[in-house]
Amino acid sequence: MSLKAFHVLFIAVSILLAFGFAFWELKLYAEQRGWMELGFGLGSFVSGVGLIVYGRYVLKKLKHISYL
């Protein structure tokens, strides 16, 4: 597995983790109305969007390098 393939896989897993945590925290906020849950949920959502932007940047930058 090349460094590019590992990087793309790691970014994809990180995006799923960020959005999963955001969903979980926002669900807790809907039930408990705690401000920490809202902050963590929104922060994780913003991190997930940032990881998507970063992932697109990396794919464009490394398009000439193979996955093998």
Image: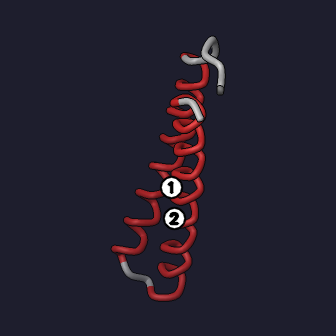
Please tell me whether residue 64 is drawn above or below residue 22 in the rendered image.
above
* CB-based contact (under 8 Å), mark 1 and mark 2: yes
Its colouring scheme is secondary structure
* Residue at point 48%, 73% (across, down): 25
Residue lying at the far top of the rendered structure: 64
Q: Is residue 37 left or right of residue 24?
A: left
Which circle marks residue 22 in the picture?
2
Q: Closer to the camera, 57 or 67?
A: 67
Q: Secondary structure at mark 2?
A: helix
User: Where the C terminus falls, by quadrant?
Assistant: top right
Point out residue 47 in the picture as x, y percentages from the top left corner.
45, 49
Point out residue 33 in the picture as x, y percentages from the top left corner.
44, 83
Q: How many marks?
A: 2
Residue lying at the far left of the rendered structure: 36
User: Which residue type carries mark 2?
Assistant: Ala
Which circle marks residue 45 in the picture?
1
Point out residue 20 in the picture as x, y percentages from the top left corner.
57, 65
Q: How many other residues sit within 10 Å of disc 1, few (<14), some (14-19) or many (≥20)?
A: many
Q: Closer to the camera, 13 or 20?
A: 13
* Residue at point 50%, 41% (across, down): 51
* Residue at point 63%, 11% (across, down): 64
Q: Secondary structure at mark 1?
A: helix
Cα–Cα gap, marks 1 and 2? 5 Å
